[in-house]
Image (cartoon, rainbow, N blue to C red):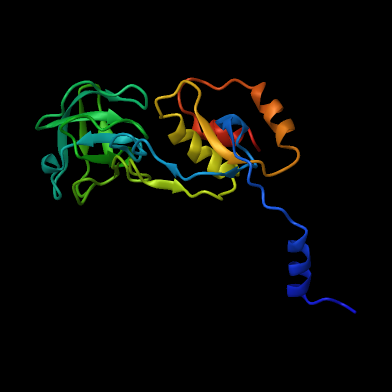
């Protein structure tokens, strides 16, 4: 006699034993494991207000909606190397995707809507229509203190990338996770992964790419 799907599942469950052993592993060894505890973010992601695109960091109040606006070019802000000064009235800073918004600026004009010289930049009319346009706010993706993953979540490449961006922000030299073992080949994956360097800075994308 054939079993129904529900009866077959019930029969299988009778032979299963839940994994209850908890171990702490380095984040590099967390792939294919199951989290044994909730993961709380120790920081905002992103950590600072930053630009959503390449363009010009400006004060929205300086930009004319009807006529071209020429602003004085005072510097550049790169991802990893922010502009150290303030943006005042009539000024603009060249900014790149992911770069920290300079103090005093509140809006980013996309580069296609502006024309630059060595000393100035001219913004096209109606290039931006609201303060804060093209600006990503600190904590927009994850707020400090938020529960990012719950206990029982399987760690796949996407989850590992997120974990790399937040767990490495803890006050630890060797960030670790409390996990359950999920698959028999976890030790092999762990050995393979330990042979690869992990840079001191957080590389969420690299954490995902290593596993593809």
Residue found at x 22% / y 20% = 84
Residue at 77% of width from left, 74% of height from top? 7
Q: Is residue 66 left or right of residue 34?
A: left
Quadrant where the C terminus is found in the figure: top right
Is residue 158 rendered to the left or right of residue 113? right
Q: Nearer the viewer, residue 138 or 126?
A: 138
Q: Residue furthest right?
A: 1
Given residues 84 and 180, the one toward you in this image is 180
Q: Where residue 181 sits in the image (x, y, percent)?
A: 66, 41
Where residue 61 appears, as percent x and y from the top left, is 11, 43
Q: Is residue 164 above or below residue 152?
A: above
Q: Is residue 154 above or below residue 173?
A: below
Number of numbered labels in the structure image:
0
The extreme bottom residue here reads 1
Instruction: Name the foreground residue: 92 vs 66.
Output: 92
Side of 203 where 135 appears, left or right: left
Identity of the residue furthest to the left in this view: 89
What is the x, y in percent for residue 38?
A: 47, 45
Q: Decide: is 61 above or below 89.
A: below
Residue 160, given in percent of the width and then of the height, sits at 55, 39
Image quarter of residue 68: top left
Q: Quadrant of residue 53?
A: top left
Quarter of the rendering occupied by the N terminus? bottom right
The image quarter containing residue 185 is top right
Identity of the residue drawn at 28% across and 37% down = 49
């Amino acid at each position: 006699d054939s079993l129904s799907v529900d009866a077959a599942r019930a029969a299988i469950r009778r032979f299963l034993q839940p994994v209850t052993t908890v171990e702490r592993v380095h984040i590099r060894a967390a792939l294919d494991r199951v989290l044994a505890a909730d993961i709380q973010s120790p920081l905002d992601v992103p950590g600072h207000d930053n630009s959503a695109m390449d363009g010009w960091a400006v004060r929205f109040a300086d930009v004319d909606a009807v006529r071209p606006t020429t602003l004085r070019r005072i510097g550049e802000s790169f991802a990893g190397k922010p502009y150290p000064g303030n943006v005042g009235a009539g000024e603009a800073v060249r900014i790149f995707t992911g770069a920290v918004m300079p103090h005093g600026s509140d809006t980013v004009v996309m580069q296609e809507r502006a024309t630059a010289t060595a000393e100035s930049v001219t913004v096209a009319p109606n290039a931006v229509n609201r303060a804060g346009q093209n600006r990503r706010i600190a904590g927009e993706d994850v707020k400090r203190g938020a529960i990012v993953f719950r206990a029982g979540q399987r760690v796949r490449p996407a989850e590992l990338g997120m974990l790399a961006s937040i767990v490495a922000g803890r006050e630890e030299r060797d960030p670790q996770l409390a996990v359950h073992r999920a698959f028999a080949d976890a030790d092999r994956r762990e050995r393979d992964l330990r042979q690869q360097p992990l840079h001191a800075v957080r590389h969420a994308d690299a954490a995902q790419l290593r596993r593809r």
